[in-house]
Image (spheres, helix red, strand yellow):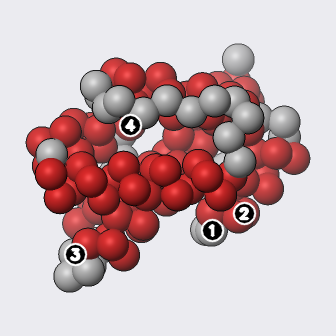
């Protein structure tokens, strides 16, 4: 599996494989497990999804850092990828972390679809 390198590439791949709804369900499941009060309707547009995940990550970093770390753990975002990010600008950092979250969630959905 070759992971998408952009948000648009990820969404295009998910939609072309008819797995966008499963991606939303996986995100909802993991956010619920992490006790993050955010749930997406299956009709959420990709731009809304990106914006809401980004805003949520930003808020968690700023106000509830332990919940942010718990979310990363539940979703299983690579610690080395998080450490490789530049943390000087919190807005930029939260956008990059949001993409890592979406990419990891996409990976889970793709593997479930491919091997089940």
Cα separation, mark 2 vs mark 3, equals: 25 Å
Mark 2 vs 3: CB contact within 8 A: no
Indicate which label's residue lies in the foreground, 3 or 4. Answer: 3
Q: Which residue is mark 3?
A: 87
Residues marked 1 and 2 touching at CB (< 8 Å): yes
Q: Earlier in the sequence, mark 2 or mark 4?
A: 2
Residue 3: % across, % down: 62, 57
Q: Residue at x 42, y 66 (%)?
A: 95
Q: Is residue 72 left or right of residue 20?
A: left
Q: Label 2: which residue?
A: 9
Q: What secondary structure is marked by label 1?
A: loop
For disc 2, the neighbor class at 10 Å (few under 14, some 14 to 19, many from 20) is few
Does the CB distance between marks 1 and 3 fall below 8 Å? no
**Residue 78: image location, x then y, percent:** 34, 51
Q: What residue is shown with label 1? A: 6
* Helix, strand or loop at mark 2: helix
Label 1 to label 2: alpha-carbon separation:
5 Å
Label placed on residue 43: none
Q: Which mark is residue 75?
A: 4
Sequence-wise, which precedes: disc 1 or disc 4? 1
Query: Does the CB distance between marks 1 and 4 fall below 8 Å?
Result: no
Residue 76 sits above or below residue 114 on the image: below
Q: Residues within 10 Å of mark 4 (few under 14, many from 20)?
A: many
Instruction: Tell me where residue 114 appears, x and y as whole percent.
Output: 73, 30
Depth check, front residue: 46 or 109: 46
Whether residue 81 appears in this view of the structure is no
């Amino acid at each position: 599996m070759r992971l998408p390198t952009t948000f648009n590439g990820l969404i295009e791949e998910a939609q072309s494989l008819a797995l966008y709804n499963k991606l939303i369900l996986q995100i909802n499941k993991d956010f619920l497990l992490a006790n993050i009060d955010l749930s997406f309707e299956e009709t959420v547009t990709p731009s809304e999804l990106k914006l809401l995940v980004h805003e949520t990550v930003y808020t968690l970093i700023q106000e509830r850092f332990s919940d942010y770390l718990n979310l990363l753990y539940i979703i299983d975002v690579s610690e080395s990828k998080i450490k490789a990010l530049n943390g000087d600008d919190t807005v930029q950092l939260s956008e990059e972390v949001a993409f890592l979250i979406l990419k990891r969630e996409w990976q889970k959905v793709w593997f479930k679809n491919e091997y089940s």
